[in-house]
Image (tube, coloured by chain):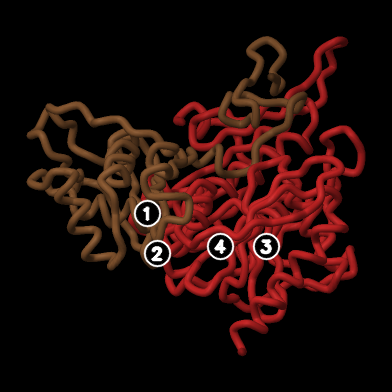
Amino acid sequence: MKKLDRLGWAEGMRVYTYGVHAGVRVSTAGMLPQISGLLPPGWKNSRRATIQRLYSLVVAQSSRRAGVRPLHILYADSDRISRDTELDQVLAALERDLHRYVAEVSPDMTFLHAGVVGWKGRAILLPGRSLSGKTTLVREMLRLGATYYSDEFAVVDDSGKVHPFPRPLGIREDSTYAQTNYTAENLGATSGVKPLPLGAVVICKYKAGAQWKPAPLSHGQGALELMANSVAVRNDPRQTLGRIQKLVRSAVFVRGTRGEACESAASILNLLSAGNRQEKE
Amino acid sequence: MKEGKYPRARLDYLTREFGDEVLVYDRERNVGHCLNATAAAAWKLCDGKKSTSELANILTQRLATPVDESVVLLAVEQLSKARLLVESEKPVRRTSRREAIRTIGIAGAIALPLVTSLVAPTPARAASCLANGRPCVSNAQCCSGHCGVSSGHCGA
């Protein structure tokens, strides 16, 4: 770390987000506006002298020697976490690691890996790992009028309500894994602001041509699925399970295999409408 | 550590109740288990002092419906497999789901005991990961769990 500290740092910032204090410093001036766009939604400047994690971004200078490709390097504390000739890739690593770190150590919230939309005053959660099709389904539900909460994390507070984490949706538009970021507003939808009680949890996997016929899941089984998608359960199982217990109180759980998102999205939204009707009756 | 001959529930686990079901978290192995109502009721009664036939009798009274010993045996076997019981000197008598269904009848009044287990993810696994072909510096960054040493890219 001392070696890193001795490098010349042009500028830096300290941020506070979900109860976590972190810092970023860069070797080249003028990068902070770009970095600000990668921070977790709702971040604020921190005035605390000590921070929990420090990112150091060494931006490569163009090399005069032929055949030498300059590398941008990112450190989290003293660990090198990314090294690439493309600055965008290194910035994406910064975003990913910071979000994961905050999700892991936040004392205020429990982070579940899930897509989230708001519908009729309740949250619908789509738990799942990367590449499971969460974003595609979220995007389709936004097209049908749902409010955007997240395509990455369901953020759960002590009372069991779901808070927005509206980072731009990373949409893969072709068979490559390259993503283009869109805000909900770019897609003609709105982002949620208010924390919502949970309405439904939909556990689904994609299979081309499959027909969406979800089966109900018990609260215990559903809670187990949420546990298996929670970022900090290994660090703090007591708090994680406590918040999950409050979260699922009045939720509907279903599981199934879906085909195209356009067919299952409407059915999922209807599921919550039906749930609301039953509750009123 | 081996214990007496009757099943005894391990009490060093974190538990949360969801109606009649119980979620049990094993901090040593980082595994979560969901016990359905029948498995949960049986697990709570396993104090190391009752035989499986005694457990069946108590469950019959508590659940106000006949509970055959084969159902308790099935519960004990599943609980033991999930390491939710203190290891017993006497090996768990095996019974199959099919055998239990045959004994209680297909339309039995209670659900067969069921223990579902899932591994708790590491923080890196629970958050977004990189697809194959994306640049990486550590295995934890890749969805595949493999970052090529020479290529510096995620791979299978």
Amino acid type assigned to the residue bearing label 1 in the image: Leu
Helix, strand or loop for disc 4: strand
Q: Tell me the quarter of the image containing the C terminus of chain B.
A: top right
Q: Which residue position is annotated with label 3?
A: A116
Q: Quadrant of the N terminus of chain B?
A: top left
Q: Residue at x 73, y 51 (%)?
A: A134
| Visible residue check, residue B139 | yes
**Pointer 2 chain:** B
Looking at the rendered image, the disc whose residue lies closer to the viewer, 1 or 4, is 1
According to the picture, the residue beneath numbered tag 2 turns out to be B18
- The kind of residue tagged 4 is Val
Q: Which class describes the residues within 10 Å of circle 4: few (<14), some (14-19), or many (20+)?
A: many
The colour applied to the residues of chain B in this rendering is: brown
Labelled disc at residue A136? none
Marks 4 and 2, Cα distance to the nearest angstrom?
21 Å
- What's under tag 2, amino acid-wise? Phe
Image colour assigned to chain A? red
| Residue B36 image offset from top left, x and y in percent | 40, 54
Residues under labels 3 and 4: Cα distance? 9 Å
State which chain disc 4 sits on: A
CA separation, marks 1 and 2? 7 Å
Which mark is drawn over residue A155?
A: 4
Discs 3 and 4 share one subunit: yes
Residue that mark 1 sits on = B23
